[in-house]
Amino acid sequence: ELGGRIYQMIFKPTGHNELYQNPVIKPNEWGPPEQGWWLAAGGIEWCLPVEEHGYEWGEPWTYQIVTSTAGLTVTLRDTTASDRIRATVTLHLPASRGYLAVTPRIENPTGSDLDYKFWLNAALAPGAANTVSADLHFVFEADQMTVHSRGDDHLPGEGQPMDWPVYDGRDYSRLGNWDRWLGFFERPQATAGFAGVYDTGANEGLARVFPSSVARGSKGFGFGWSNPLPSNIWTDDGSTYVELHGGIAPTFWDTATITAGQSLEWTEYWYPVSDVGQLSAATAEAALGVRASGDRFYVGVHSTAPRAAGTSTLYAWDRDDCAELARWELPAIGPGEPFTASVALPPIGGDDGGALDGVAFVYLDNEGNLLAAVNPQDCLPPTSSVEPLPPWVGTTSFAVTWAGEDVWSGIETYDVQVRDGYEGTWTNWLTDTTAISTTFTGTHGHTYFFRARARDQVGNEEPFGDEEWGQTFTTVLTETAPVLVTSRKSATPGLFRSDQTVAYSVVISNTGNLAASAALTDTAPAEMAVLTATLAATSGPPPTYAGGQIHWSGTVAAGGAVRVTYTLSPTAVTPFGVPLTNTAEIAGSVLGPFTRRETVTQAHILWLPLIAREWGP
């Protein structure tokens, strides 16, 4: 009956109504001059077609409710008249999210362009008390405000700029620092796409996330603190509140125009936040609160969606050089499960104090997508890789292709390295290239390994990977031949006690296009004993042991592999702390015999108790 307003927004984890709800309906003299009165009923109201709460806050709106597995949707409409501007507001409460999606739609069904003003106005009192405290903070990402009205003559007058949040040495983001009433707009218009309030005493607040390119107006209002407007103007129980407005035009003095027969709509996200210490940034995905206390920064994360443990990460970076100051892989988090942490920071940017504006706090999901940030800065390198090649190619020239991803600024260039043979060294093939595919020319019988790295538009560069086989490899075979270069040797454990045995494995792998007549000669360390009963092979004859060497020979099919295994045991002459290396020679590959080595060490392994005190990030 009173403008189709949202009366309450209950935050289930706390059970608190974050919107102010006036216990009485009491007319006051505020409102548009042409009307001359208004009801501070509370909640969120829709103000049109003029400023100062409009006319339709007291008119009945029709509504429609739709319930589905996706959530609850309520559509409000002020009128179906075709001779005037009209509005619908769709409210959607998703089943899987902790926010209210608010979609205003302004319609001009007439044949003429119409000037109008539309604002939504939220009366806020976060926490349990249905009133605000001195510790309520307005949150705007702005350096200046335009004063709409004020009761304090110390402040700039109507229409004048005012520095924000600190003006003349006083922090006006905190309500308790106010003397009398104050109303203000972001100047010259909203730019950050979020605003909100947070009561640090109640440790609760509310965020508004909106498209600032459409909803350019963002306004705050409070009744004052030391000498506030008397609450008996609007209520009888002494309760008070603050207001958060959002509109199409930047200020109440500005007018928007809607073309004949056209409509305008956008979606905002409103949600409660609690137990994060402060509200510093908000998106539809998450909110962050960062505050300094003593020699530490305290950070809180609120997610509007449930996220499983290990699926999101919070970073703290030095904005000067992107040095990582802290990183947290978050546990399970959701609307009722915030995450909080603190970090002791060294001097940032040469300042002894380690100022907050020198640190970027960035919250990302596992794909690197930005969920929310305070002082956002791209400090994450891109990722890249060379696309897989076939085990062998039949020509000396072949195409090598690579790709990368950078979800922030985009990839600028790549470096691509090549290694000729397993024992070769990595050398630059292409540097600082924008290409993503180039022809490489090789030699028959040679196996080439490739790896890539990328750098992004702001200079972040990923390191080269240290994969044993590179990111991909292939062998040039202009005629049929076996290729055993990817054969490998391993031993477990690398550090062994005197009462432990060591299990060895040699995999003879053929990536060529012809079966290999392979031969293995593996010389065991003289200080260890071969347990001959453990000699085994997955194909061909069993291995043999003679003269300190293990022997195996047989056929390895093209595209196939044979695994030879055995076990060594320490003896009385096995030294402690001395690396013992045994070398296996493998014959039968296109370029002749090659070796693979493995080193193990006998050690005194001790488990010592560890006591950690004052442990924390």
Image (spheres, rainbow, N blue to C red):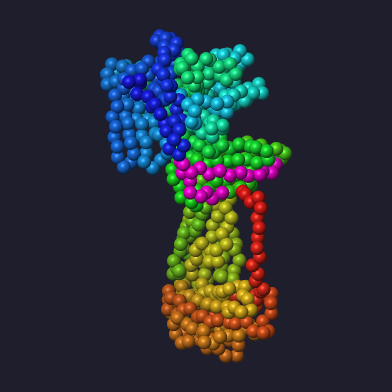
Residue 596 appearing in the image? no
Q: Give the quarter of the figure containing the N terminus.
A: top left
User: Is 150 left, or right, of 294 in this rendering?
Assistant: left
Residue drawn at x 34%, y 39% is: 71
Q: Residue at x 35, y 27 (%)?
A: 89
Q: What x and y, as percent, mark residue 433?
A: 54, 52
On whether residue 335 falls in the magenta region, the answer is yes
Q: Is residue 525 left or right of residue 372?
A: right
Q: Main secondary structure of the magenta part?
A: loop
Residue closest to the eye, 307 or 103: 307
The residue at 55%/66% (across/down) is: 468
The picture quadrant where one finds residue 395 is: bottom left
Q: Is residue 510 left or right of residue 324?
A: left
Residue 490 placement (x, y as % from top left): 55, 74
Magenta-colored span: 328-349
Residue 427 lies, with reference to residue 585, above or below; the image says above
Left or right position of 76 against 588: left
Residue 380 is inside the magenta segment:
no
Residue at the far front in the pictured view: 237
Residue 33: percent from left, percent from top: 43, 9
Identify the residue shown where x is 48% and y is 54%.
403
Residue 458 x/y as whole percent: 57, 43
